[in-house]
Amino acid sequence: MKPEIKEFLRVYGQALKDNNAAVFAGAGLSKASGFVDWKGLMREIAANLGLDVDQETDLIAIAQYHINERLGNRSVINQTIIDHFVKNVDLTENHRILARLPISSYWTTNYDNLIEEAIKEAGKTPDEKKISDNLLTTLSKRDAVVYKMHGDVVQPNEAVIAKEDYETYEKKRGAYSMVLQSELLSKTFLFVGFSFDDPNLIYTLARIKNLLGEKASLLRTHYFFIKKEDDCNKAKKQELKIKDLNRYGIKALIVDGYEEITIILKKLNEFYKRSNVFISGAAECFEEDNQNEDKHKLFVHNLTKKILSNQYKIITGKGKKVGDIVIDGTLHYMFLTDYRHLDEFIKMRPFPLESVREGISEKEKKEEKKQRNTKYRDEMLQEAGVAIFVYGNKKDKNGTIKNSSGMEEEFNIALEKGIKPIPIGATGYMANELWIKVINDFEKYYPSNDDNKTTMEEIKNLMQKIGDDNKFKEKINQEDYNTYFDNIYDCVTEIIKKLNTVNSL
């Protein structure tokens, strides 16, 4: 992985965790879905003027020339915008990844609605700011704001497209610049889908730099994807452009192909989610005679507090006994730290107990519950990047204690989602079975590469220390059991810490 990509993942990943990340999307993001870029939009209009759009660099001027020729009439341009951007297209993976991330501000110069649709698909509510007047109102219970700096396809007459629109921008849309100025100072931006020749980028950045004046030097480092040029002349111009972008606090992330952007965004998503720890656990009993139940409860309680003290968030499905202890440990930690925002510490997703339908047979109820629980587990694990497994047993219909099939299902779902498993085999039952799986085929669950080989070896060594259930049973009956517990807590949190470094990706 290139050093600048590692830096981006660290810096922008932290901005996501701090809720200080923003996205600025250009035409290239939508082009992958089938929409046109600026040249495609202006191609027919340029041809009607007797110009070759591929030979022109000032596309804003072409739009203005067209309007001039029609004595100020914009009807053809308006219809062109509608024709090109009112059609059904599929969202790209990049749209979906960016929408799933905890980003509250999306800025765009695009006229289409793909960003808004991706946010909705992710189960969130976008507050769309299509014209300046929209900035005066706030949508109730919004999850993200979409600032459409150049307008929207549903109001093409208000679209910023020609020279005159830029010349009067501050008068008609100056409020956007004021908000953007503030966000560039307080948030870390990722620019996606812009090219160095995109006139939108040039006008926008110049306008912001002028607005900031002397404060321009205070800008945070922002990031910008660009595909590497192979042609010598184009490569030289690209190099100069990259240096010029540094004036605006924007650092280029050079990729060899556009598909690499998707790979990087997937790594970003994976890296961010690793601060969210899912705890899978259910215990009809903690050991055969349950004589040390209080000590087992203390183990789960303190494990929870240890994870939280390292600034990770917990997700729990409130499994039998274990879930209640996790919640209690979270509340205890929260009050110890005198911090009252529970939702920043834990996300609780207790399973529904009853069937949603009435009048069906017991067999149908059982099958319905099974399907519902599978779907519920899938949704619950959606936001996690690490999954801890403890205990894992239940009673069958004959009252016999057996290993939990639900925990095994959660383990398999976690693997499908790329979540890193940490089975604490020392707690026995299904957790021990899962630990044996992981430790015996470690490369399958923690694949290594040139960048993360050392980190993976360190994680394997730590993983080996949390798997001896016989030692756990022995130590829990001794006076120094707390010291042994501390060793397990330290190993688990150290694994999570290593997974939350860029070198683990």
Image (tube, grey):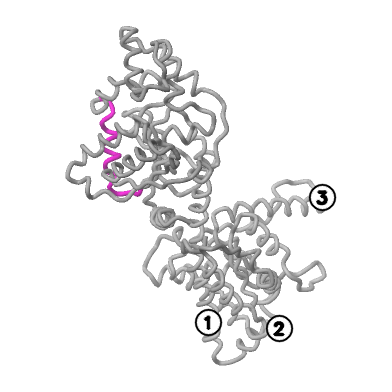
Residue 402 can be seen in this image:
yes
Tell me the residue that label 3 is attached to: 361
Q: Can you say whether 115 is above or below 310 in the image?
A: above
- Percent across and percent down for residue 217 are 22, 48
Q: Picture coordinates of residue 4 (x, y %)?
A: 40, 54
On whether residue 121 falls in the magenta region, the answer is: no
Q: Main secondary structure of the magenta part?
A: helix
CB atoms of marks 2 and 1 within 8 Å: no
Q: Distance between the residues labelled 1 and 3?
A: 49 Å
Q: Mark 2 points at which residue?
A: 289
* 489, 194: nearer the viewer: 194
Q: Which amino acid does label 2 sit on?
A: Asp
Closer to the N terminus: mark 2 or mark 3? 2
Q: How far apart are marks 2 and 1 (CA)?
A: 25 Å
Query: Which residue appears farthest toward the bottom when viewing the image?
Result: 479
Mark closer to the chain start, 2 or 1: 2
The image quarter containing residue 422 is bottom right
Disc 2 crowd, CA 10 A, few/some/many (<14, 14-19, 20+): few
Task: Tell me: 361 left or right of 43.
Answer: right
Q: 300 or 328: nearer the eye?
A: 300
31 displayed left or right of 283: left
Find the magenta span and give its range. 172-188
Alpha carbon distance from label 2 to label 3: 36 Å
Residue linked to disc 1: 487
Which residue is depicted at the point 43% across and 13% down?
A: 47
- Image location (x, y in percent) of residue 137: 34, 34
Viewer-side label of 2, 1: 1
Q: Looking at the rendered structure, which numbered label has been put on residue 184?
A: none
